[in-house]
């Protein structure tokens, strides 16, 4: 019976639907202390003084610390961020002091008694202000910070963090060969991850020096490594534990509250301290999604063949680098979209502003570059009077082409975009037309978009799997990726079951991650878990099979090559009735006479990214991932030209995933991605006042798409195997979001008859764009 | 020392019944209860569009009328039906028109609470409309909400989201009810008579609100005047 390609109930489903599942913040213990932060009310100010004396005297308070307590700078790309601000605050919501008290209430009350004297500084409230020659510096030491990522080049005396270049082909030739040139601008504001579980961490320091942190992280091993580096603690003394995580979307991939939890525990002699973000803190004090401004110029022949692409992206990283520059790099390296373009010139700049700082977010920058590109492609199609899907078909990247990074494209490493476009076309009934005026005057319109994405991981991103066995012959599966919601623990169990030719119910998953027990997994990010851990678990299965066959060959008096494994049994290929069951082998074999051999069997497997090459600083030549995943998406809306409102009717995706392991969860992941994309397209954005204060930091005013506001979702899978993927599978977890904002904006632009080059698109924006935004007295 | 006193347990705050030709609603009655009992369909309609069902189970009439959220949409049906509230403080009880509670001078004193709302029975089943428009969502604070109630030949209007407080304007009503001029002209004449500064906030600009107000008033007047009787 196949174990992959069949709908499989996730291992933690019963615990989750009954409420028995525990997330990190559910674990309240009697001896836990509680920490709360005081945050900056200014976007940019000097801290003249902080008086904590009244807070220290407040009931239940054990410690109050500020940035002076343990001055240190953190950051995985640029070490520019103090966990608690010191001397200066650079964004609204930044922590300026931390109170540890017996109860959360006491800690909260004491934060209000801390007196901070600020001297406001000029605020940089936009990308334009940041790059202006008169701009004040947000980081005076920008040229002197240590950059763990050696490819980053912050520019001294500016707010410019990095500049990534992609140079391919000959631009002059590209423009010469073009019959038409289209220019297009695009803007996507900052927004939040809004995982259901807000970020939280608990830290304690034991008398023997061990530091134990349990946290809602996507990256427990990165937490271990960074805590070790920042505070000078040997890695072996640090234990990071992560139970189920209540959604992450990239927002829990950076180390954030773990620093604060450690400092809080240290300030009270190592006692166990819990820090848990309120929703408002999770929005404004923990990192958010990037904002981007893009300019696209494409040249094409009259047949719609794109000959040249010139793109400039500015990425607003907010007050600290976070993961921003890496997303700017990802945007540049995948900036062509899944199109074959011979001549490419891309500049991607990362800049500081006084906005909330940023970290990875589902799609890792690709949503922004795709939005810009797909708006431009639609404008090109319109100028050439071509069908929007036809122009994408003509330019679709395929075997033998090269990416902007000059990496060779194969069917295996990229999949079949044309098959996706054809599938999409059929699923949304494209042939009926993409702009239809209904009898009641409303307009039904369809917009489309293509996407691709690769991992953009470090060249040495690695993972491991360990397998132990129970005396009933069942397997315990242990690996270091955290279960952040997509059911990947189950997906990996399916792959193992398929490899072992056994029932998935006899595979038991270690649902948590404990860095002391679990093999290292780089980070649960980049849609890479199924691919990386899947490859590792296949190797671990091979390792088990090899050992089982070796042992069984002794018992059955044959060579290992004579044996086959299936149904938790090792048997002779030519005489399947003769064999031995796992349960007699896995803890060592005992002869009928009494002597025993071998001992418990342990399986192991690893995977490391292969042959990735960092981007060349001048040309951007390199290889940023093992493979791409491509797809095509569409959004259908109904526009009311009298009210300037629209309704979402359908959202569709056709994606080449190589091989579907768990169809229902895969479909759910793509739908979830589309839903987030529609959220970005229709309503999600941070609004800043003129002085850089985020205005909508609560769910009263920050709007998400709600159940009931969703359209009908259509998901179709294409399966072009990736030959080095586990059973042919490639990544798919983020991808549902990537093309949706572009497809939505294309649909609305077509319906309204005006170009919408920024999201979110609200009815007021449509009204303002269509009418000039002035009330007409009729 | 700050203190919070829960007044929801006071028996008078929990009644909801027709008594001597009047509907009496205690200020502690939840929005869901008002909607379920449905003595006053226009009010039921209004409260069912405030927050979501779970929250409607918690929000009380008194809370919605006087809380810190400025929209107070349950006031609109009460305004267009000339309702009164019974307010009590240590000096005794007074019965005041609902609009007074949003008036700086005639409004509630510190330490004065609303005990009950009183609606005359003859208003309960008049033809009405209730229209709510938000920035984008099904459930959200209003961009603009309007309640309309047809009392004889005259339509009464209550507005939320237009200014910082809910209001009913007799002057605007006179203009909007003047059938001697076309509907669009009436609306254009009524809008400059909005009794306060028009809101400009995250939900919408002043200009957009005026556009929306015009559109909504036109819809309402068209419905009342073209289709005659209706219940929204």
Image (spheres, rainbow, N blue to C red):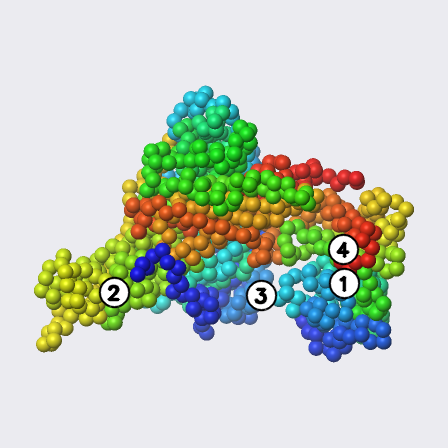
**Where does the image place residue B142, in percent across and percent down from the top left?**
69, 54
On the image, the x and y values in percent for residue A635 come to 54, 45
* Quarter placement of the N terminus of chain A: bottom left
Are discs 2 and 1 both within one chain?
Answer: no
**Same subunit under labels 3 and 1?**
no
Q: Quadrant of residue B49?
A: bottom right
Between marks 4 and 2 in the image, the one whose residue lies nearer the viewer: 2
Q: CA distance from mark 2 to mark 1?
A: 67 Å
Mark 1: few, some, or many residues within 10 Å (few <14, many ≥20)? Answer: many
Q: Are marks 2 and 3 in contact (CB under 8 Å)?
A: no
The residue to which callout 3 is attached is A109
- Cα–Cα gap, marks 4 and 3: 41 Å
Point out which mark residue A687 bears.
none
Return the residue at label 1: B42
Q: Which residue is mark 4?
A: B146
Question: Which residue ends up furthest to the top in the rendered image?
Answer: A176
The residue closer to the viewer here, A429 or B89, is A429
Residue depicted at 77% across the width and 70% down the height:
B39
C-alpha distance separating marks 3 and 1:
43 Å
Query: Helix, strand, or loop for circle 4?
Result: strand
* Location of residue B46 with respect to A683 vertically, above or below: below
- Give the mark, 2 or 3, whose residue is nearer the N terminus: 3
Please report contact status of discs 3 and 1: CB closer than 8 Å, yes or no: no
Residue A46 appears in the figure: no
Few, some or many residues within 10 Å of mark 4 (<14, 14–19, 20+): many
Q: Along the line of sight, which residue is nearer the eye, A375 or A617?
A: A375
- Whole-number angstrom distance, CA of label 2 to CA of label 3: 61 Å
């Amino acid at each position: 019976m196949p174990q992959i390609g069949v709908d499989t109930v996730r291992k933690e489903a019963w615990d989750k639907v009954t409420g028995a599942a525990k997330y990190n913040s559910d674990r309240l213990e009697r001896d836990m202390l509680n920490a709360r932060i005081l945050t900056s009310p200014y976007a940019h100010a000097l801290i003249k003084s902080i008086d904590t004396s009244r807070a220290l005297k407040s009931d239940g308070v054990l410690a109050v610390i500020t940035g002076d307590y343990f001055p240190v700078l953190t950051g995985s790309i640029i070490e520019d961020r103090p966990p608690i601000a010191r001397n200066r605050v650079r964004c609204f919501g930044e922590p300026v002091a931390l109170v540890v008290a017996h109860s959360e209430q006491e800690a909260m009350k004491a934060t209000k008694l801390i007196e901070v004297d600020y001297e406001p500084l000029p605020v940089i409230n936009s990308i334009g202000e940041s790059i202006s020659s008169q701009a004040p510096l947000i980081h005076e030491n920008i040229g002197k910070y240590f950059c763990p990522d050696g490819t980053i080049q912050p520019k001294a005396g500016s707010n410019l963090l990095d500049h990534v270049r992609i140079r391919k082909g000959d631009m002059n030739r590209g423009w010469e060969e073009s019959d038409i040139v289209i220019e297009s601008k695009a803007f996507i504001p900052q927004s939040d991850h809004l995982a259901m579980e807000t970020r939280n961490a608990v830290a304690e320091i034991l008398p023997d020096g061990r530091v134990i942190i349990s946290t809602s992280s996507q990256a427990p091993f990165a937490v271990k490594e960074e805590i070790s580096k920042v505070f000078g603690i040997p890695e072996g003394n640090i234990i990071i534990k992560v139970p189920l995580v209540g959604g992450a979307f990239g927002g829990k991939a950076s180390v954030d509250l773990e620093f604060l939890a450690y400092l809080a525990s240290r300030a009270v002699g190592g006692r166990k301290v819990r820090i848990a973000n309120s929703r408002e803190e999770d929005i404004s004090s923990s990192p958010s999604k990037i904002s981007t401004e893009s300019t696209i110029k494409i040249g094409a022949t009259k047949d719609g063949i794109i000959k040249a692409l010139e793109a400039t992206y500015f990425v607003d990283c907010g007050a600290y680098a976070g993961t921003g520059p890496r997303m700017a790099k990802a945007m540049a390296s995948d900036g062509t979209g899944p199109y074959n373009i011979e001549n490419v010139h891309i500049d991607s700049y990362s800049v500081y502003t006084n906005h909330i700082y940023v970290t990875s977010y589902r799609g890792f920058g690709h949503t922004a570059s795709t939005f810009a590109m797909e708006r431009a492609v639609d404008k090109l199609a319109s100028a050439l009077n071509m069908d929007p899907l036809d122009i994408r078909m003509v330019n679709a990247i395929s075997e033998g082409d090269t990416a902007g990074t000059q990496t060779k494209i194969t069917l295996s490493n990229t999949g079949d975009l044309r098959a996706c476009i054809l599938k999409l076309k059929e699923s949304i009934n494209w042939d009926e037309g993409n702009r239809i005026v209904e009898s009641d005057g409303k307009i039904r319109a369809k917009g489309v978009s293509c996407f691709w994405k690769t991992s953009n991981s470090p060249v040495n991103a690695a993972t491991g799997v360990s397998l132990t066995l129970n005396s009933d012959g069942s397997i315990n599966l242990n690996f270091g990726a955290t279960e952040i919601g997509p059911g990947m623990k189950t997906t990996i169990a399916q792959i193992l079951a398929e490899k072992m030719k056994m029932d998935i119910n006899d595979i038991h998953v270690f649902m948590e991650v404990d860095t002391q027990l679990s093999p290292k997994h780089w980070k649960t990010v980049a849609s890479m878990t199924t691919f990386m851990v899947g490859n590792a678990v296949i190797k671990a299965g091979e390792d088990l099979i090899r050992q089982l066959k070796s042992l069984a060959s002794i018992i059955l008096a044959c060579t290992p090559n004579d044996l086959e494994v299936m149904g938790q049994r090792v048997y002779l290929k030519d005489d399947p009735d003769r064999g031995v069951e796992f349960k007699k082998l896995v803890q060592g074999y005992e002869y009928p006479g009494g002597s025993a051999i071998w001992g418990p069997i342990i399986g192991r497997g690893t995977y490391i990214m292969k042959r990735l090459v960092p981007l060349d600083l001048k040309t951007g030549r390199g290889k940023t991932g093992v493979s791409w995943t491509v797809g095509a998406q569409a959004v259908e809306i109904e526009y009311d030209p009298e009210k300037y409102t629209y309704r979402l009717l359908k959202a569709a995706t056709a994606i080449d995933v190589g091989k579907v392991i768990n169809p229902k969860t895969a479909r759910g992941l793509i739908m979830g991605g589309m839903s987030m994309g529609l959220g970005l397209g229709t309503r999600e954005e941070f609004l800043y006042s003129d002085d850089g204060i985020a205005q909508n930091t609560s769910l009263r005013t920050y709007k998400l798409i709600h159940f009931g506001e969703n359209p009908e979702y259509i998901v179709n899978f294409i399966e072009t195997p990736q030959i080095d993927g586990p059973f042919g599978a490639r990544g798919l977890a983020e991808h549902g979001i990537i093309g949706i904002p572009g497809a939505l904006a294309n649909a609305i632009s077509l319906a309204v008859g005006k170009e919408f080059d920024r999201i979110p698109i609200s009815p007021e924006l449509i009204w303002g764009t269509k009418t000039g935004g002035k009330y007409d007295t009729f | 020392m700050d203190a919070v006193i829960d007044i929801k347990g006071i028996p008078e705050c929990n009644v909801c019944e027709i008594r001597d030709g009047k509907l009496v609603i205690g200020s502690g009655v939840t929005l869901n209860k008002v909607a379920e009992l449905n003595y006053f369909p226009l009010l039921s309609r209004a409260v069912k569009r405030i927050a979501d069902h779970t929250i409607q189970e918690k929000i009380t009439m008194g809370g919605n009328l006087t809380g810190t959220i400025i929209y107070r949409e349950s006031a609109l049906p009460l305004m267009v039906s000339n309702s009164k509230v019974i307010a009590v403080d240590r000096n005794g009880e007074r019965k005041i028109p609902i609009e007074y509670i949003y008036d700086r001078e005639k409004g509630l004193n510190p330490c004065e609470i609303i005990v009950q709302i009183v609606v005359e029975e003859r208003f309960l089943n008049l033809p009405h409309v209730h229209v709510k428009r938000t920035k984008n969502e099904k459930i959200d604070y209003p961009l603009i909400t309007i309640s309309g109630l047809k009392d004889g030949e005259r339509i009464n209007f209550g507005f939320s989201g237009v200014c910082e407080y809910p209001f009913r304007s007799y002057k605007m009503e006179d203009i909007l009810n003047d059938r001697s001029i076309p509907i669009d002209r009436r609306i254009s004449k009524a809008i400059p008579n909005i009794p306060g500064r028009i809101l400009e906030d995250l939900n919408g600009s002043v200009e957009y609100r005026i556009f929306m107000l015009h559109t909504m008033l036109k819809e309402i007047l068209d419905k009342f005047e073209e289709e005659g009787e209706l219940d929204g």
